[in-house]
Amino acid sequence: MSQETMKLAIQSVISEMMDRIMNRVLFEDPFEKDKFQATKPLYAALVPLEIFKGSHFERRFVTPFGSAWEKLAVVAASEGLGFGEMGRAVQGTVKSEQLRRITEVLNRLEHRAKKSEKRVRPDWDAELAYILDGDGEDIPVTVVCDVYAENVKTGERFAFELKAPLPNSDQTKVSKEKIFKLYCMEPQQVEGAYYALPYNPYGRKEDYAWSFPARWFNMKEDEVVLIGDEFWEKIGGLGTYQAFIEAVNEIGAEYKEQIYREYLGIEPPSGSLDTPLS
C-alpha cells in the first residue's frame, strides 16, 4: 500500500460525502430565506440571515460526518491491514462474575460511594486485572464493534470504538463496557480493542482536555486510548495519518470555495481558503 493509494481512497470517501451534502443544501433542502423570516421574524430582525444559513448547513454536515469517520477507518484498514468492516458483531462468552465486575467498575467511575468521597479516577490496567480475575458461569455475549479490522498477513484482529474528537460521557461509558467485554470474551475474538478518536483538536495527546471521556478513561495514559496519528497508524500502518492530512487539505479549498460561492452566495474572504488541517 502506497501513501498515494491511501490518500486517494480517503479522498473518495470524503468527496462522496461532501457532494451528497452539497446536493442536499443546494437542491433537496435549501435554506429558505422567506420561510425563515415568516416563521422567525424576531430572529430575522436581530441577527443577519447568513448566521442562520450557516447553522442550516452545519446541521446537515455534522451528522453525516459521524458515519464518515467509520467509513474512512474501513478504507484505512482495507488498504493497510488488509481488511476492515463497520458494525461487526463479535460473539463469545464472558464469565458471570466478570460481567458483574464490569458493572461495578463503571458504577464506581460514574458515582461516588459517599458524597464526601472523591469520584474514582480511571485506571485501565487495574480495572481490567480486577475484572479478568472474576469467574462464574459462561454467559453468551455479543458486542457490535464500530470498526473491526484484520491483519491479513498475521491473522491479528482488532476492534475499535471510534468516536468524534469531542465525545460525550454516555457514548464513552458504552464504549468502555464493550471493550471490557471484548477483552474478557472466550474464545478470544480480538487481539486488541481500543477507544479511538480520529484526531486531536488539542494538538498533542498530553494536552487533550475534553472532560467528558476523562470520566471513563485516562485519555493521556491508558493504552487502549488511541488519538489521531496513533489510531490511523494502528489501523492503516505508518504514513496513514499523513495521507489523511494530505487528502483533506488537497480537496478542502475546493469545497470551501463552492460553499462560499454557491451556498452562501459571497466571494471567499481573503485567506479563507488557506486554513489547512495539520
Image (tube, rainbow, N blue to C red):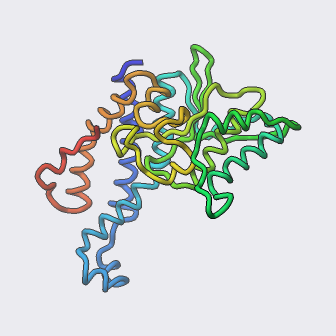
Residue 102 vertical placement versus 238 (above, below): below
Q: Nearer the viewer, residue 238 or 254?
A: 238
**165 displayed left or right of 109:** left
x and y, in percent, of residue 215 in the image? 55, 51
Q: Provide residue 180's location: percent of width, then percent of height.
A: 67, 39
- Asked where in the image residue 217 lies, by quadrant, the reply is top right
Quarter of the image where one finds residue 50: bottom left
Q: In which quarter of the image is residue 8?
A: top left
Residue at the right extreme, as displayed: 137
Residue at image position (30%, 67%) is 53
Side (left or right) of 256 relative to 78: left
Q: Is residue 79 above or below residue 258?
A: above
Estimate the x, y position of residue 213 in percent, counting from the top left.
52, 49
Residue situated in front as seen by the camera: 275 or 134: 134
Q: Answer with left or right where residue 146 lies relative to residue 22.
A: right
Where does the N terminus fall, quadrant-wise? top left
Quadrant where the image shows the C terminus: top left
Horizontally, is 33 left or right of 164 in the view? Answer: left
- Using the image as rendered, state which of residue 215 and residue 12 is in the foreground: 215
Q: Which residue lies furthest to the left in this view?
A: 270
Residue at the farthest front position: 116
- Count of all numbered marks drawn on residues in the image: 0
Q: What residue is drawn where x is 62% and y is 44%?
A: 176
Against 9, is 2 above or below? above
Tell which of 81 and 263 is nearer to you: 81
- Residue depicted at x 34% and y 29%: 243
Name the residue rendered at 30%, 64% in the picture: 54
Q: Position of residue 134 (x, y in %)?
A: 80, 36
